Each structure stands twice: as C-alpha cells, then as structure tokens.
Amino acid sequence: MGIRTGEDYIRALKSRQPEVWMNGRKVTDLVNEDNFKQPIREIAKLYDMQHDSKYRDKITSICEETGERVSNAFIVPKNYGDLMARRELYDVWAEATFGLMGRTPDFLNVTVTSMASSPDFYNQYNSDWAENIKNYYKYIRDNDLFMTHALINPQVDRSKSSHEQKDLFTHLGAVEETPDGLIVRGAKMLATLAPITDEVIIYSFPGFKPGDERYALSFAVPIDTPGLRLMCREPMQDGKRPLFDHPLASRFEENDAVLIFNDVLVPWDRVFLYNNVDAANKLYSETGLSQNTHQNAARGLVKLKFAQEVASKVADAIGVDGFLNVQTQLGELVQSVETIRALLRTAENEYTIRSNGEAIPNPIPLETIRGILPKAYPRAIEVIQTIGASGLILPPTEADLNNPELAEDIDRYYGGRSGISGEERVRLFKLAWDLSGEAFGQRLVQYERYYSGDPVRKLGMFYSKHKSQNSFDMVDRALEEANDFKNRYPKNPV
Ligand SMILES: Cc1cc2nc3c(=O)[nH]c(=O)nc-3n(C[C@H](O)[C@H](O)[C@H](O)COP(=O)(O)OP(=O)(O)OC[C@H]3O[C@@H](n4cnc5c(N)ncnc54)[C@H](O)[C@@H]3O)c2cc1C
C-alpha cells in the first residue's frame, strides 16, 4: 500500500472500536469525540503532507524491497545522506505541529525500524523473535501505520520490583502460554494518543531483576485487541473552546492513556521478547532502539525554538525587550536553542556505522540534549511567564472582542507598543498563555521532563557509561608530573 493519506488514516480509525474510557464513559464514536477530533485532524494533515509535492520527496523515499513509496522513518539509514533524509521528515512534521505533538507517527516508526535492523540481538536469544520483529516492521511500513507505546509500569510501589508488587499482575506479565500465543494481564503506561493509533507496542526500560521473568516482555497488538482497555486521563480541552481563545490547546492536545490488559491473547508471531531478563535489560542498549532520540532531539529543538520565539514576541509587543533584565532572559533562551542545534549537528556529523550496517548519530550529544531539554524547556516557559506577567491572564475572550460595546476599550487598554493593536496583543498573549499557563501547556512541560524516561536515572546511567568508556588520563598525567617535579627538585621546584 505504501504511504497513506489523511483520509486513509481516518477510514482506518472508523473501521474499529477499541475499548476507550474517558470521564467515566465508553467512547463509542472516536472520530467525532470532541477531545480527539482536532488531534486526528493534525495527524491526518501529516499523512497528507506525504503526498504534497512540496514535501513528498523530502519526507518519503522509494523502498528498495517493495518499490513502493514509504515514509523516511522506515528507511534503514546506511550513510549520512539517509540520516539527513530522516531528519528532514522529523523537521517537516515537527514544524507543522510547532514541536508540540511528541508522538507523531515518525517516532515509533523509526523505533521499530531500528529494532528490526538488529536481528543479531534477537537471534542470540530466539530466532523466532528476530523473524517476528522483521515481519512486524514490514507490516507497519507497508501499511504506514501509526503506533503508540507503553514502557512503564503503574506507579503503585516504585520501591519494589515487578514480582514483589502486592498483586502478581499489577505490572503487565505473562499469565500462560497457549498454542495460539501468550496470555498477558496487568497494566502498562503511559500510552500517548493511544485511542487514535492503529497499534500498540510494548517494551520496557532496563531494570529487571531475577524473578521478573514473566514481566520481561515485548510484543505488539492492534489497538482494538479484545481485552485491551484504554483508560484516558481527564481531557485538558473539550474540543469546543474557540480557536481564538486557545489557539494551541484546541489543536494539539495529545491525550494519554493507561493500558489495562485483561487476559489479552498475543499471537506468537507478535512476540518479540519474553521470559528473559537479560534480553529485556539489553534491548535498549543493543538494538539501536535509542535511534528515536534523534527524532526526539529534532522535535524538541523545534518546540524550544517556538517557546523562545513566543517569549521574544511577548517582550516586543509590550515594549519591554529594551530592559537589560529582559534581554538577558531572552538571550539565555536563544543560547539554549543554539546549544541544542549545535549538539544535534554534532551528533549527525559524528555518525558511525553499526555492525549491522546501520548509520547512527553519535549518541553522546543526543543524550546530552536529553539531559539539557528537561531543564531548558521549563526555563523557557518560566521566562514567558515572567515577561508576560499579568498580561497573560487578563486578555478578554473572542466573545468580548465581537461585542461592539467593548471594542473601543479593548483597543485602547489591551493594545501593545506603538503599532500593536488590541486584537493583535490579545491573540499573542492568549497563545502565550496556552503554552505557559493552561493545563495543556503544563502537560507540555511535564512531557519534556519525562517523555523519554526519568531524567535523574538517565543522567546517572549516562555518567556510569561515560566512566566505563573513559579513562582520566589528564589527571593521572598531572599527578605523575607533580611527582616527577618533586623528585627532580626536592628542595625548590621553581
Ligand atoms: C506527558 C507524558 C507523556 C508520556 N508519554 C509516554 C508514552 O507515550 N509512552 C510511554 O511508555 N511513556 C510515556 N511517558 C512516561 C514516561 O516514560 C515516564 O513518565 C518516565 O519514564 C518516568 O516514570 P514515572 O512517570 O513513572 O516516574 P517514576 O519512575 O514513578 O518517578 C517518580 C519520581 O521518583 C524518582 N524515582 C523513582 N524511582 C527511582 C529510582 N529507582 N531511583 C531514583 N529515583 C527514582 C524519579 O526520579 C521521580 O522524581 C510519558 C510521560 C509524560 C509525563
């Protein structure tokens, strides 16, 4: 089939009925559900871009194996040019959504492509797993599917491992093997956009201990698989708020869901890893799975740049960007953006070729971005809040603007510096408040902190790896030289 259109995507959504719960009720008409309508439109727009002559050759390529046109996310990169073709896709889709939608289809499409490019990893444990992930990759590539993923366990008791939780199936685990497949029970989270995706893939961060074998799992199933319940969080917008008043929240809300597996059958050909703690702990580091950090970084850069531009526009609109304290805050944001941009470029320029022939960006600058963004993005939001001050919470609504009795007052008292009308400033500050104050904007902050794991443990792992791969030669040399000096000039080492 090759690349889908937005209409293809929506048709697929209409053709199935996953078990979705929101606000205490079952959602039975996904595409007309107020909270989902707008994000569906945004995702459909991305699929349509694949067919738009302006983008088509930038973000899609001809698949060598099938001769079909596929998303660049499905091309296994062999060289710098391939990596940059992927980057082009990340940039084009991130810019179309201002970086505010973290889980656009490219993210997991790339993830699965990387998993499938590491047959040696799977083969060392079980050749069926290697075959399954390869076939699965082809399936999502050839049907251009949109996926969600759930990596972490419910937050019940983080001080205990999976097998020590008070209920054996609090964490998702295998109940039994049957001729048709594995029966799995328990919960996984946090599956962003799950109700409006086609498929869900399960895998985990490392950290399994002996005794956790039944929880060491990786598989994929269609989102409407019987027994799979999607519990959505409370919506942060109801889909009915005017675009004028909520120009971002009313377009880019990504709902998140906890996935509850009530004895779900996973067919054997959809099992990629099972009952092996060692394999589950090495999956991340040995499959190139973390290739998706490249997409994360490119998207994160667009989002940070957007926040930086919003801060600058807000400051300019009310004539405060000539003050030194405001300039230093805005300058700091520009430097954050430039830091991420430079790191991304370094990661790409310093790409290497793995033993499987796959080109991968240097993971060290990418992990460094991963360490910086959870601080840089919240800081950008704090700067918007600090500079916008009361102006962020006072703007009138579209209804106020439409009332002729209020129009004159709004223009006079809500305008900005010379040349900025009341309506212009109101619109800008509403956008800034969506990003920095609304629940929608706060989720975006929480997303940047956590979307790719706990930054605290990630930084700890980053340092442990650094220590294992680096010696501290300069310190050794300084100590040796000092010793040498002492021996040579015992009395007066001048
Ligand atoms: C908006 C948003 C969207 C997300 N989307 C997805 C998604 O699409 N798919 C997905 O799989 N996940 C998603 N995530 C989840 C993300 O993977 C987790 O938030 C992240 O891994 C952290 O886990 P946690 O939230 O359970 O926090 P916890 O692990 O419960 O941590 C809570 C606190 O305790 C500390 N802590 C916990 N355990 C330890 C420990 N062992 N050592 C030291 N400190 C510890 C942490 O540092 C943290 O401060 C999303 C998260 C957010 C916020």
Image: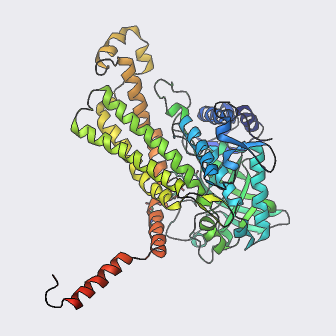
Give the x, y percent position of residue 19. 70, 45
Q: Which residue sits furthest left?
A: 492
Is 150 situated above or below 37?
A: below
Give the x, y percent position of residue 247. 49, 28
Indicate the quadrant where residue 120 lies. bottom right
Q: Is residue 438 visible?
A: no
Question: Which of the two residues, 107 or 322, is positioned nearer the viewer here?
Answer: 322
Indicate the quadrant where residue 9 lies. top right
Q: How is the image coloured?
A: rainbow
Q: Give me the residue at 86% from left, 66% from top.
A: 179
Specify whether 417 is left or right of 235: left
Is 71 situated above or below 120?
A: above
Indicate the quadrant where residue 261 lies. bottom right
Considering the image in quadrants, where does the N terminus appear?
top right
Q: Give me the residue at 52% from left, 34% from top.
A: 237
Specify whether 11 is left or right of 209: right
